[in-house]
Amino acid sequence: MREPEKSPVNQAAAIRLEHGSGGAMSRELVENAIFPLFRSDAFPELLDAGALEAGSDLLLTTDGYVVDPPFFPGADIGKLAVYGTCNDLSVSGARPTCLSLALIIEEGFPMEDLRRAMTSAAEAVREVGAKVVTGDTKVVPRGKGGGLFITSTGVGRRMFSYPLSPRAIQAGDGLIISGPVGAHGLTVLAARESLPVGGSLRSDAANLYPAVSSLFPLGSSLRFMRDATRGGVSAVLNEIVQGSRMGIIVEDEAIPVSDDVRTVCGLLGLSPLEIANEGVFVAVVAAGAESQALAALHAQPLGRDARLVGRVSADCPGRVLATTRVGGTRVVDFPRGLLLPRIC
Amino acid sequence: MKIEQILDRRRAVVSEGGVRVEVDVSLLADPRPGDHVIVHAGYAIETLSLEDAEERLELFRKLAELSGEPGGTG
Amino acid sequence: MSEESALARQLVSEIGAVTARIGRPVRLMEVCGTHTVELRKQGIHSLLPPEVVLVSGPGCPVCVTPSGYIDNAMKLVSEGRAVVATFGDLMKVPGASGRTLASLSGTGRVKMVYSPRELVEAARSSALPVVFLAVGFETTVPTILSSLMDAREQGLRNLLLYTAFKTVPPALRFLLSDPSHGIDGFILPGHVSVIIGSDAYAFLEEDGGRPGVITGFDGMDMLVGVLALLRLIQAGQRKVRNAYPRAVTREGNARALELMARTLAPRSETWRGLGAIPGAALGLQDWLADADAQLVLGIPPAEDREAPGCLCSRVIAGVSLPPQCGLFGKRCTPDDPVGPCMVSSEGTCAAWFRYGASR
């Protein structure tokens, strides 16, 4: 285990855009520059949500939303601010109950757009079955903001009593992806760059609680879940095994990707595994429980395309490998370099 | 990618996987709807002579044959 | 198991058998940036016997462009003399100062494009000259020229090209002219060959040449290409074969070649790490002098300087492998690259780093 003080991030003089991509540098920033200051018994590892108090059934999570542009096919910043935060609670085994919304609005942001974003957020909250109970609004001068930034904090009630942690995974465990990957990030990129890709792309932003909770009956066979946002599935898989005695082997051919995402990725030279999603999660389940997990997901609207894509293996500690279409092996690294900024 | 529609001597609409994009086809001798083309940086650079998937597999089978021994999947 | 994966296994098995019959290590050079990436991405390296060593040649156009080119481009931007337009990779290559074009985005005079088609509109909507960083091999060259002609036909004369066009066949000749090259055969580029045609490699069949197989880009294509090349080596046949016949013809793309012949002429330019290779570059002909950014804006020749410790020039020449560079994976990573081999999506070091030296 590397000493945080010696990590590259602590030698850097300034934050770079890459620190926010959700890839290796983001991970380093949090793990080595921020987390060490707050680590405690209540906060022993980086999970998506934390308990309000020791022994409490209530979990707390928070997330910032800076997506540019704020509106795009399939969703908008308001929806993301609700679904994203609620999904963090869901994959932590909790049913979302209440949210706060803190807005930082840049002077000049159109009032109509603010109304649209908030209406959308309100619809999403109703759909999730939670409530917004408090909030805050600040306005910053023109040029000092990014249009609209939203921070949402959520509380949920634990409905799954087994530990959900990367430390729970064991050799032979199966790896499931809940649905087709790459749609959200690609949609935002296409909207931002006005890419003329003939409009079939749509963000997959959605409330994952129904699909996630369909796995709760697995009990202790459900080891860990995480939604695959910035950095995509690739970041999640690497986060699960980094520093671990376990590794992961996935099959390229098994990864669910829809044709339009595959095509646009081919045109842009991007990899679907590295692109952000807002309606997809990864689940690690015990060997033997895969069929039960898939059956449960396939009965859910958002889990229809769920696939078993790989296994946890003791053969490649700390690494994620992929078996290719022709039977070769390649490494699936943490996404590196500047990925798509302001994607969620 | 498949040519769906020729717009003028330069521009055509091509599609693949449900995605439609406009590309420049002026580097092709005789572009026609239905042609499959290789696209590079927004330009169609060649028309693919359509080999069936079956034809391609046949080519691979032949190449996989061990010298002097029959190959293929039997 | 699908028929395709069964065939892949047979191809791998036959590759093993042919390699054993060759009975000694073989060095195969691939000369196309896309192959550098796809060979790793499809896991081909992991399927080859250890005696088969794949070496990357100078097939990454960004990688073979001298560092001074970026400095010259940045100067145009900071001096407010032009809008510089470029493909994405070049935005992130550090110049001699360590700074990148991306860092100048705030000036509003740096424009990233996905296709040369966007240059016409860029020229139309700019009061300043638009200088396109025209870097590429024969696949990309005709697309850039096509866009330039389009702009001029529409009366736009402010689109200029800062050319750094390179051609593959002269580079191969140059590599073979060094008696210690150690190359047993070439995996020849797929899409460059679409443009130039398989006849362009006829010189490889002469004395001093080496066998070459034109290869496509999916996993099966590449296994077939490697197998065909190994068979030629094993049989002692100095031949060029086309394993991508669905896209590559003997004559190539006549319209693209005609456009290039009409607008460009061969010349000698510096290839980063290899020095000046005779006739391995293309520049604008005299009648297009007013589209030549170097002439119109008085851009000085690009200096070729390596950052201390950077081994890109040796990696590009196929002499060193990325892990042999002291900076690889330590000071130089895709997050924080020093040299172009790590910046470019087609760079050898980037491919090694991202997809793993699984062997």
Image (spheres, coloured by chain):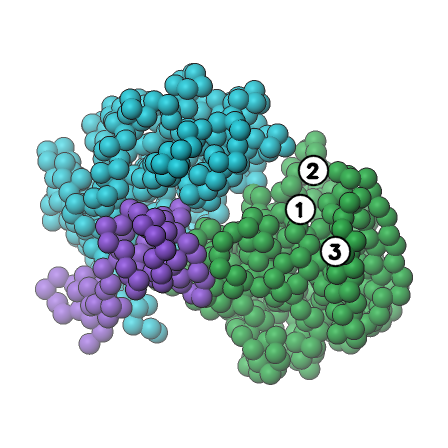
In percent of width and height, residue C188 lies at: 25, 44
Q: Answer with left or right where residue C294 lies relative to residue C243.
A: right
What amino acid type is highlighted by mark number 1?
Answer: Gly
**Chain C tint in image:** cyan
Between the C-alphas of marks 1 and 2, the distance is 9 Å
Between C198 and B58, the one nearer to me in the picture: C198
Q: Which mark is residue A15?
A: 2
Of discs 3 and 2, which sits in the foreground? 3
Q: Which mark is residue A20?
A: 1
**Chain A tint in image:** green
Between A340 and B42, the one nearer to me in the picture: B42
Between A208 and C194, the one nearer to me in the picture: C194
> Mark 1 falls within which chain?
A
Residue drawn at point x = 66 percent, y = 38 percent = A16
Residue C308 visible, this orientation? no
Q: Is residue A67 above or below residue C280?
A: below
- Colour-to-chain, purple: B
What amino acid type is highlighted by mark number 2?
Answer: Ile
Tell me if mark 2 has few (under 14), some (14-19) or many (20+) residues whose alpha carbon lies within 10 angstroms of its own: few
Q: Secondary structure at mark 1?
A: helix
In percent of width and height, residue C244 lies at: 23, 54
Residue drawn at point x = 61 percent, y = 62 percent = A73
